[in-house]
Amino acid sequence: MCVYIDLAHGLTKMCNNLICLYRSMSLFLFAYGIATPFGSIH
C-alpha cells in the first residue's frame, strides 16, 4: 500500500511537471510564432 501511494505521488508529480513543461513550451512557441514574421521581414 505504501509503495502504491509513493508511485501515485511520483506519477502526479511527473504529470504536474509535464503540464508545466507543456505550458512553457506552448508559450515559447506562441512567442516564437509572433516573433518570426517580424524576423522574416528583415
Image (tube, rainbow, N blue to C red):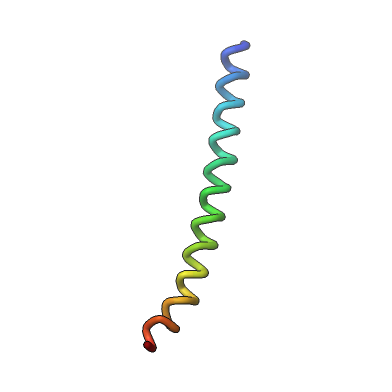
Q: Quadrant of residue 27?
A: bottom right
Nearest the camera: 42 or 18?
42
**Measuring 42% from the left and 77% from the top, which residue is drawn there?**
36
Q: Quadrant of residue 4?
A: top right
**Measuring 56% from the left and 47% from the top, which residue is drawn there?**
19
Q: Could you tell whether 41 is left or right of 34 in the image? A: left
In the displayed structure, would residue 26 be above or below residue 31? above
Q: Position of residue 17 (x, y in %)?
A: 55, 41
Nearest the camera: 23 or 42?
42
Can you say which quadrant of the picture contains the C terminus? bottom left
In the displayed structure, would residue 22 be above or below residue 37? above
Q: Position of residue 11 (x, y in %)?
A: 55, 30
**Measuring 50% from the left and 62% from the top, which residue is drawn there?**
28
In the displayed structure, would residue 8 be above or below residue 32? above
In the displayed structure, would residue 22 be above or below residue 12? below
Q: How many marks?
A: 0
Can you say which quadrant of the picture contains the N terminus? top right
Q: Position of residue 15 (x, y in %)?
A: 56, 38
Q: Residue furthest bottom?
A: 41
Q: Position of residue 39 (x, y in %)?
A: 40, 81
Q: Residue furthest top?
A: 1
